[in-house]
């Protein structure tokens, strides 16, 4: 497919933020027990407000996937996110990976969080993102649960290999997951040499050269004529966050390396590309032509 002409409007990408604190990430779950969360200094409110200020400077609206745990503790922050024109969406309640939950437990969390966010903001919550992108071959039942709970879309699959998540056989772009009919919007990857490569944010955005992300996302926009989905976390704009003891070398690198580069790179990204909310991009009229795909599920239960 040919690239955009100079007069064509640039394609708009989705900017998303997974609102959780540094001590809640899956990479630290063996070092910080859930019952010990209250012992750690909470920094998510201040960091999320820094993100709001960053978006305001660049006139960018985004989708915030918010933990119910955070929403309960910072209701004013939820209202301010909504008042600033951003989409408020669900990240589940307590950052439990779906592989550790039964369908009943999952249902309780997504319903509880949806109602909490809607009560706080007065806005409908239609989007969901699984903690650690934990919708995969063993947890595809989540799509039906989300549909029945009133969600319209999920952004919970990354179509590449990763030690904590990933479903490389999944489509790279938005599709209706069968049999639920829920719209699944994967985080963006670029395809090279018959393999998917990250260009959708997260730790890769800090660890790899910015030029690789720019090239990958530009290819998705101009050659594939598709909107990308980019994400990051509030703790990634916080180089001064407390250091967690006992973390493996791999997870120290993954979490802490290049935190000082996050904001400058985000500034550059918002200069180089156009961004908006998930719902405006993917739920707008005229986007009903997404393909329907039946992903291959396994019988693996919670582990």
Image: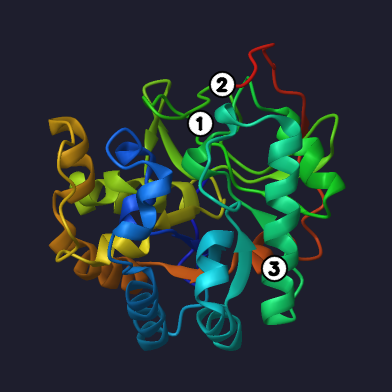
User: What SS does tag 3 mark?
Assistant: helix
Q: Are marks 1 and 2 in contact (CB under 8 Å)?
A: yes
Judging by the rendered image, the residue that carries numbered circle 2 is 169
Residue 85 against residue 45 in the figure, above or below:
below
Q: Are marks 3 and 1 in contact (CB under 8 Å)?
A: no
Judging by the rendered image, the residue that carries numbered circle 1 is 159
Residue 256 against residue 235 in the figure, above or below:
above
Counting residues from the start of the chain, the first of labels 2 and 3 encountered is 3
Q: Nearer the viewer, mark 2 or mark 3?
A: 3
Asked whether residue 276 appears in the rendered view, the answer is no
**Residue 39, quarter of picture:** bottom left
Residue 81 against residue 67 in the figure, above or below:
below
The residue lying toward the viewer, choosing from 94 and 296, is 94
Question: Are there few (<14), some (14-19), or many (20+) residues within 10 Å of tag 2?
Answer: some
In three-dimensional space, the C-alpha distance between marks 1 and 2, rounded to whole angstroms, equals 6 Å
Residue at 29%, 46% in the rendered image: 203
């Amino acid at each position: 497919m040919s690239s955009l002409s100079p007069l064509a409007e640039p394609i708009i990408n989705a900017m998303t933020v997974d609102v959780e604190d540094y001590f809640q990430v899956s990479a630290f779950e063996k070092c910080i027990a859930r019952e010990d969360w209250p012992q750690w200094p909470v920094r998510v409110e201040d960091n999320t407000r820094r993100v709001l200020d960053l978006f305001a400077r660049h006139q960018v609206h985004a989708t915030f996937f918010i933990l119910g745990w955070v929403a309960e503790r910072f209701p004013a922050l939820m209202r301010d996110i909504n008042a600033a024109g951003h989409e408020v969406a669900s990240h589940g309640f307590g950052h439990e990976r779906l592989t550790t939950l039964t369908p009943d437990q999952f249902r309780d969390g997504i319903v509880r969080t949806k109602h909490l966010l809607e009560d706080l903001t007065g806005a409908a919550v239609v989007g969901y993102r699984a903690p650690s992108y934990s919708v995969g071959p063993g947890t595809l039942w989540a799509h039906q649960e989300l549909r029945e709970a009133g969600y319209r879309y999920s952004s919970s699959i990354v179509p590449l290999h990763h030690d904590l998540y990933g479903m490389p056989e999944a489509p790279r772009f938005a599709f209706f997951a069968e049999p639920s009919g829920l719209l699944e919007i994967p985080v963006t990857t670029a395809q090279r040499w018959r393999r998917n490569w990250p260009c959708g944010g997260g730790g890769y955005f800090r660890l790899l050269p910015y030029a690789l992300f720019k090239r990958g996302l530009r290819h998705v926009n101009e050659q594939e004529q598709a909107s990308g989905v980019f994400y990051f976390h509030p703790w990634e704009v916080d180089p001064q966050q407390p250091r967690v003891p006992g973390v493996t070398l791999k997870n120290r690198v993954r979490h802490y390396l290049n935190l000082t580069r996050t904001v400058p790179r985000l500034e550059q990204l918002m200069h180089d590309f156009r961004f908006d909310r998930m719902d405006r991009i993917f739920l707008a009229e005229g986007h009903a032509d997404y393909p329907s795909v039946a992903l291959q599920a396994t019988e693996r239960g919670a582990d």
